Image: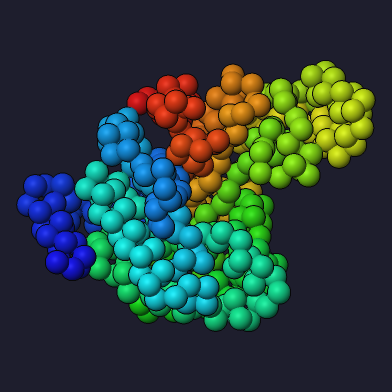
Amino acid sequence: MTFALDRRKFLSGLAAAGGFSTARAAGNESRPGAGIPPALRRGFNLPDQAPRRDGKAADPATLAALRRRGMTHIRLPLVAEAALPYFSGPAARGAALDDLERSLGRLLKLDYAVTVDLHPDGPLHDLLRSDPDEAQRALRAGWRGLAARLERWPAPRIFAELLNEADIGDDVWRPFAEDLAGEARALLPRTTLVVGPAPFQRAEQLARWRPFADRNVLYAVHFYTPMIFTHQGLDWDASSPYSHLEGVPFPSAERDPVLARLRAEALARGDRPAARALEETARTAWTPAAISAQFSALAAWSASHAVPVIVNEFGVLRFKAPRAGRLAWLAAVRAAAEANGFGWAHWDYAGGFGLLDEQGRIDAGVMSALLPDG
């Protein structure tokens, strides 16, 4: 039996069971001036499913519990290199896209909306930096293959993100992104496309963009400010000044005494990069009000152009951050996004930033910060 037949059986069965309503789905389509699609208001990222990584399969019961709690949306990263002919052969691409479609089937059955996020794992970033023209050709070819898979699924519940954090100057990325969106639109005429600025999808960068002529586009930003708080104790880059830090607070005052103590400790151990980062952070009071102010220009941009915005990555590593500070920061970002009419998707699910604790259980404190009415 082919996977296409499985998909048709799934969709017809879901409709018959009342699990997928055409009327409800149509209400979730992005429309000019309509704000964020309701299905994308609250969500989280679910990496490692496409291609599926050993030991990383998401537990269906946990996903169902999160849906019952009020999560409506999953951003599903697809490893870009696995989907692009430039990096992977037909068998590897087919396996990755089959994994993607299996995940889509499971998540739609649980009544999630899903953003398929083309998410580089390294080599594509290298190609973007070394040969932007070749990288653009590779992305066009990859999207042709990906669109052929996505067109089989109900467009109102599937969203297509052109590329995560393109590692290239925004002056190069912005015109190419609009061109790529045009190609994707020809292949996916009803699908809402998702795009953000390069290289880190920062809110202030998006606020300087001219929106695309295509009105069925959702604009995405990421938020991890201040990085010294959200990334303290990171374990994937020992050269980062954040990797040696622990106990950085949130909220923090201007010239905060805790930051001053941590800076003195960093200087004592000869860690000048960490000391400089702490000194820079202490120049600003980091509070919920300060986080809200970070979104003010983007909120004005969104309103003036009548275009929807989603904060589709934000989170705090749990390793070294004070727990109370982590929960306060998550609540502040969630509240600021919602106050401005933005959707949001927490990063991530079960990793160091995750919704789950180290035992793989749903973290009640994190859920209360994100879904206070759930």
Q: Is residue 304 left or right of residue 185?
A: right
Q: Residue at x 25, y 54 (%)?
A: 105
Q: Residue at x 90, y 23 (%)?
A: 264
Q: Is residue 103 left or right of residue 1?
A: right
Q: Position of residue 22 (x, y in %)?
A: 17, 56
Which residue is more in the foreground, 318 or 48?
48
User: How many numbered discs?
Assistant: 0
- Does 238 appear above or below 37? above
To which quarter of the image does residue 197 belong?
bottom right
Q: Residue at x 29, y 31 (%)?
A: 65
Which residue is more in the foreground, 27 or 185?
185
Q: Position of residue 294 (x, y in %)?
A: 65, 42
- Does 27 appear above or below 233? below
Q: Residue at x 86, y 39 (%)?
A: 273
Is residue 19 something that shows in the picture?
yes
- Does 102 appear above or below 162? above
Quadrant location of the N terminus? bottom left
Quadrant location of the C terminus? top left
Is residue 328 something that shows in the picture?
no
Q: Position of residue 14 (x, y in %)?
A: 13, 51
> How are the residues colored?
rainbow
Q: Is residue 329 left or right of residue 258?
A: left
Which residue is more in the foreground, 79 or 208?
79
To which quarter of the image does residue 164 belong?
bottom right
Which residue is more in the foreground, 372 or 301?
372
Q: Can you name the residue that lies furthest to the left here?
A: 16
Q: Position of residue 227 (x, y in %)?
A: 70, 39
